[in-house]
Image (cartoon, grey):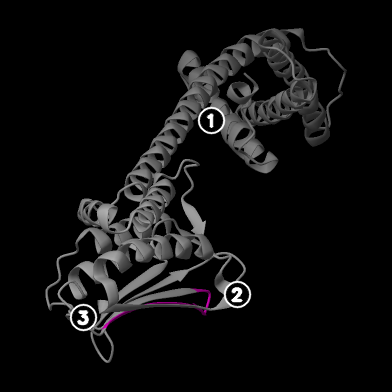
């Protein structure tokens, strides 16, 4: 309730006095002068205009500051709704009385007249009606605007939450996705090993289970350390070594100080799989696949290189590259660069800006 009724929480004291004191007072004074001129059938004298403008501005400024003080008191006490209403109208009436008396003090000073405290009951009664009417209109307007502001903020918050949930769902879908071709080939290799080398088949099954467990991401984390990512890559390579045999040599080079750096989860393995599937799949001997990770200015560079078929001039992103782009777009928008390089060595190079100590 306090959030809804706090009229001045987003405005400075000076802005409040200019907007709801000076400008509103000038507007009310002008309207009163026009109204009196219409009633009398002629333009009222300049002295009356000065009186009206002076009364309106001083009373408006006085009410503005009185209600501001009352609201501050209400906030300090964390009061209820009815207390806010009571303090608001008390502030309005107190500000009116103070404003009227201050105006008469100014008039007595300017025109050298005698001032007597609270000797203007007619002015108090007339001003009371106007003040209550205007302050009620202002309160209603401010309440409606504050309620609308809060609804807009709530909708913006809901939209932000929905966007976050959507992003998390997309990441979970990307991170839990294992290429079905890899699964098919791995299961075929296990089936072939069962009768030839049961122990090796069992070891391969355990490693496949380990890779799946990592991909399932039970803790729903979007990031993993480079050490964890490399463990998943090594598990994957151990499985693929059974299928490729001695046709391909695998190499992983990592700068020691980068092991603890957190990067998007399941980022490297799809790139390694992409190299095997599209670059080295038809290699019969002498194949090479290397993963190189090192520090760069404000970030990390990941390179996955192979000596297989070069990237075509017009490359259509498959599972490996597409999942890489998708994860980086979600977690590091405008903070990464992906390069497909054919010369002098063929490799995928990813540079990620990392906002953490390296």
Query: How far across and how far down the image is residue 142, in percent?
Result: 54, 24
Query: How far across and how far down the image is residue 54, in percent?
Result: 67, 31
Specify the label residue 308 is tagged with. 3
* Disc with the residue nearer the chain's start (3 vs 1): 1
Where residue 291 sits, quadrant-wise, is: bottom left
Residue lying at the far bottom in this picture: please name it: 344
Magenta span has 293? Answer: yes
Q: Quadrant of the C terminus?
A: bottom right
* Residue matched to label 2: 257
What residue is rendered at 23% in x and 85% in y?
342
Specify the label residue 27 is tagged with. 1
Pointer 2: residues within 10 angstroms few (<14), some, or many (20+)?
few
Up-down relation of residue 18 to residue 198 (above or below): above
Residue 200 is left or right of residue 85, and the answer is left
- Of tags 2 and 3, the one toward the viewer is 3
Query: Which contiguous range is marked in magenta?
Result: 287-299
Query: How far across and how far down the image is residue 348, in percent?
Result: 31, 75
Residue 271 visible at all: yes
Labels 2 and 3 touching (C-beta < 8 A) = no
């Amino acid at each position: 309730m306090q959030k809804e009724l706090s009229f001045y929480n987003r405005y400075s004291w000076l802005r409040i006095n200019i907007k709801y004191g000076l400008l509103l007072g000038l507007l009310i004074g002008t309207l009163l002068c026009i109204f009196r001129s219409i009633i009398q059938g002629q333009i009222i004298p300049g002295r009356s205009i000065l009186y009206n403008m002076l009364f309106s501005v001083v009373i408006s400024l006085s009410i503005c500051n009185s209600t501001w003080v009352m609201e501050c008191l209400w906030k300090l006490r964390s009061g209820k709704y009815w207390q806010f209403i009571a303090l608001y109208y008390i502030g309005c009436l107190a500000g009116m009385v103070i404003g009227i008396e201050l105006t008469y003090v100014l008039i007595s000073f300017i025109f050298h007249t005698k001032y007597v405290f609270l000797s203007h009951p007619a002015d108090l009664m007339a001003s009371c009606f106007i003040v209550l009417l205007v302050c009620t209109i202002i309160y209603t307007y401010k309440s409606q605007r504050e309620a609308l502001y809060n609804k807009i903020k709530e909708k913006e918050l809901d939209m932000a939450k929905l966007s976050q949930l959507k992003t998390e769902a997309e990441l979970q879908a990307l991170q839990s996705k294992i290429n079905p071709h890899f699964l098919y080939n791995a299961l075929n290799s296990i089936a072939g090993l069962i009768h030839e080398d049961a122990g090796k088949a069992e070891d391969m099954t355990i490693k496949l289970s380990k890779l799946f467990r990592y991909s399932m991401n039970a803790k729903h984390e979007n990031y993993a350390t480079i050490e964890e990512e490399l463990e998943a890559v090594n598990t994957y390579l151990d499985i693929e070594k059974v299928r490729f045999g001695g046709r391909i040599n695998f190499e992983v080079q990592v700068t020691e100080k980068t092991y603890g750096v957190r990067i998007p989860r399941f980022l490297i393995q799809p790139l390694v799989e992409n190299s095997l599937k599209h670059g080295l799949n038809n290699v019969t001997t002498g194949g090479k696949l290397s993963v190189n990770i090192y520090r760069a200015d404000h970030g990390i560079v990941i390179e996955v290189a192979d000596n297989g078929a070069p990237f075509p001039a017009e490359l259509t992103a498959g599972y490996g590259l597409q999942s890489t782009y998708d994860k980086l777009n979600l977690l590091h928008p405008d903070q990464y660069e992906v390069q497909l390089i054919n010369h002098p060595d063929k490799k995928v190079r990813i540079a990620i800006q990392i906002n953490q100590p390296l």
